[in-house]
């Protein structure tokens, strides 16, 4: 009987070399206050200068999320007094953000759903504060990091849906190469807002939730909050418009501060930065930065390569894996075989060594070579798995490994016939049983031959020879 | 400009000035205030608020600029611990 409305505010740090309004290095994890200058430390009399790459990446995201691009992106000062921002204002966008009215399509519970994006704007990140006893410690390395804020409309209804949106979004920005989407390190952050109301009555009183540093916490916090608000309304208790914090140790949201009215940030145009007007040349460069996005690639993998959904989901999850897969296919590998090797055998080895495909000894060319050796029957499946292990262990081409280790499949009929004779002679009881019509010992004899050859005998040929010689 | 106002401003700006400096600073600030009054006289007409764009976009390349050693900037902090700037606790 209640309807819930969930919206997200997602912040992503852009992968630029330097900060958005000054030439300091933009890097996580350095010694405190090493990447700072008079501009990001708010010294008087300094001038911000817009980083061309930051605005470029911002427009790429706005385009990828189907936004109407602003013909004029205006920067404004958002005034607030808190020591994480030494200037006492944050340069942000308010009246004319760079993108508006976009959307992200989701497939949620088997149905397609469109989540609208209200706006996308570029701003600077604040510094980091550590509260310790009676003092606070400030580190301004992060102050001035280009931060893109994506605000959705309250179009989602459940925690699971918000979690899915975040996962899709994260995949998209990683595909675009604009952000690494690391929620633990804070390069991607998310605040959620949720209200519930009787069906058909529109939005309820909005509660904001902060401190959500994983998509799982987003789901859990939203579902907790929907339940809490439902219980309140059932009891006739009004929901208070407020900001709550997710307590990840207790799995609850806790009141933070009551929001009696909207903050007055006294926005005014940043006098030190002229508006940015994207020209035709700039927009052409933005279009060049667009790539096939994960959802489109997933659909194409299913349609063109005949993959099932699980395989397609696995392959498209990381752009590097999807690129690798298509590189393997270019060498003529069968789509389903290549997909299955990546999904199972390769993944098993990577997980075991806790490593990534990119930068590992397995290149697309090496996997393609291995699959082609397998397809040509020069090795069989079991050996192929050993070769794969050896590629990772020895960093060599599969063909070389096979040659060095003498793993090439034995498929000379004369050689194998002699071997079959030898095994039959050594196992007369089993051989006689087969000759008498019992097929069961065939497996045992096959095993003996494989043992003799270290698994290198071509199994179909051995089977044929066994049948001939016992028939 | 009234010296008492100047003293309050100096205190807010964390400036420790000698009495004689207030006199010279007072004259400087007067000039600045006069300049602002002059600007107030200008007819802005229908000009939009904020900086006017002149010609091409003003952007800088995404390259590191390091013309001031951060350590020099940190020297101005009232208190440091390791490399953190220390302030009274604010939550």
Image (cartoon, coloured by chain):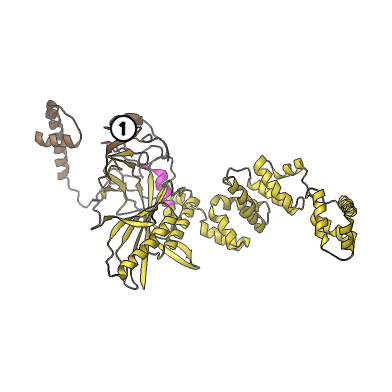
Left or right position of A264 against A20: left
Q: Secondary structure at mark 1?
A: strand
Q: Quadrant of the N terminus of chain A?
A: bottom left
Task: State which region is magenta.
Answer: A40-60
Q: Quadrant of residue A222?
A: bottom left
Q: Quadrant of residue A235?
A: bottom left
Chain appearing in yellow on the rendered image: A
Chain ID of residue with mark 1? B
Left or right position of A187 against B34: right
To which residue does mark 1 refer? B80
Chain appearing in brown on the rendered image: B
The residue most toward the front is A429
Q: Is residue A206 visible?
A: yes
Q: Give x and y (percent) for residue A220.
A: 41, 59
Q: Residue at x 16, y 29 (%)?
A: B17
Answer above or below: position of A232 versus A249.
below
Q: Give x and y (percent) for residue A464.
A: 85, 59
Q: Give x and y (percent) for residue B47.
A: 23, 50
Answer above or below: position of A283 versus A236.
above
Q: Residues within 10 Å of mark 1 (few under 14, many from 20)?
A: some
- Confirm whether the magenta stretch covers residue A51: yes
Q: Is residue A461 visible?
A: no
Q: Residue at x 31, y 43 (%)?
A: A84
Left or right position of A324 against A114: right
């Amino acid at each position: 009987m209640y309807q819930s409305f969930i919206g997200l505010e997602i912040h992503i740090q852009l992968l630029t070399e330097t900060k958005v309004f000054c030439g300091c290095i933009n890097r996580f994890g350095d010694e405190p206050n090493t990447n700072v200058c008079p501009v990001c430390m708010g010294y008087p009399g300094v001038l911000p200068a817009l980083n061309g790459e930051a605005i470029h990446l911002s427009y790429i995201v706005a385009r990828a999320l189907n936004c109407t691009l602003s013909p004029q992106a205006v920067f404004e000062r958002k005034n607030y007094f808190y020591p994480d921002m030494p200037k006492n204002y944050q340069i942000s966008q308010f009246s004319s953000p760079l993108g508006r009215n976009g959307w992200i399509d989701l497939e949620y519970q088997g149905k397609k759903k469109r989540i609208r994006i209200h706006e996308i704007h570029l701003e600077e990140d604040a510094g980091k504060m550590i509260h310790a006893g009676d003092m606070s410690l400030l580190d301004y390395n992060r102050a001035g990091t280009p931060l893109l804020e994506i605000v959705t409309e309250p179009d989602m209804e459940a925690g699971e849906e918000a979690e899915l949106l975040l996962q899709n979004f994260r995949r998209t920005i990683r595909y675009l190469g604009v952000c690494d989407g690391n929620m633990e390190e804070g390069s991607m952050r998310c605040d959620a807002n949720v209200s519930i109301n009787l069906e058909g009555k529109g939005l309820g009183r909005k509660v904001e939730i902060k401190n959500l540093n994983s998509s799982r916490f987003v789901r859990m916090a939203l579902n907790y909050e929907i339940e809490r608000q439902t219980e309140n309304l059932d009891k006739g208790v009004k929901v208070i418009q407020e900001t709550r914090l997710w307590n990840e140790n207790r799995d609850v949201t806790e009141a933070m501060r009551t929001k009696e009215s909207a903050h007055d940030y006294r926005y005014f145009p940043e006098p030190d930065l002229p508006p940015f007007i994207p020209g035709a040349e700039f927009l052409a460069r933005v279009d060049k930065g667009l790539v096939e996005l994960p959802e489109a690639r997933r659909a194409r993998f299913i349609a063109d390569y005949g993959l099932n959904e699980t395989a397609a989901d696995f392959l498209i999850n990381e752009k590097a894996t999807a690129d690798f897969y298509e590189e393997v296919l270019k060498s003529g590998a069968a789509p389903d075989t290549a997909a299955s090797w990546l999904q199972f055998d390769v993944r098993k080895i990577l997980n075991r060594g806790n490593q990534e495909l990119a930068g590992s000894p397995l290149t697309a060319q090496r996997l393609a070579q291995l699959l082609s050796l397998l397809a040509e029957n020069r090795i069989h499946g079991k050996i192929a798995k050993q070769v794969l292990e050896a590629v990772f262990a020895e960093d060599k081409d599969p063909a070389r490994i096979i040659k060095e280790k003498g793993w090439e499949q034995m498929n000379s009929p004369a050689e194998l016939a002699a071997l079959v004779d030898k095994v039959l002679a050594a196992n007369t009881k089993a051989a006689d049983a087969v000759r008498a019509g019992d097929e069961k010992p065939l497996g045992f004899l096959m095993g003996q031959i494989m043992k003799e050859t270290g698994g290198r005998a071509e199994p179909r040929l051995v089977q044929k020879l066994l049948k001939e010689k016992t028939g | 400009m009234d010296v008492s106002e100047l003293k309050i401003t100096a205190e807010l700006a964390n400036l420790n000035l000698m009495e004689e400096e207030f006199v010279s600073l007072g004259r400087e600030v007067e000039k600045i205030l006069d300049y602002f009054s002059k600007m107030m006289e200008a007819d802005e007409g229908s000009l939009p608020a904020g900086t006017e764009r002149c010609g091409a976009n003003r952007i800088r390349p995404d390259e590191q600029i390091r013309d001031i050693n951060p350590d020099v900037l940190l020297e101005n902090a009232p208190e440091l611990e390791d490399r953190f700037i220390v302030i009274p606790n604010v939550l």
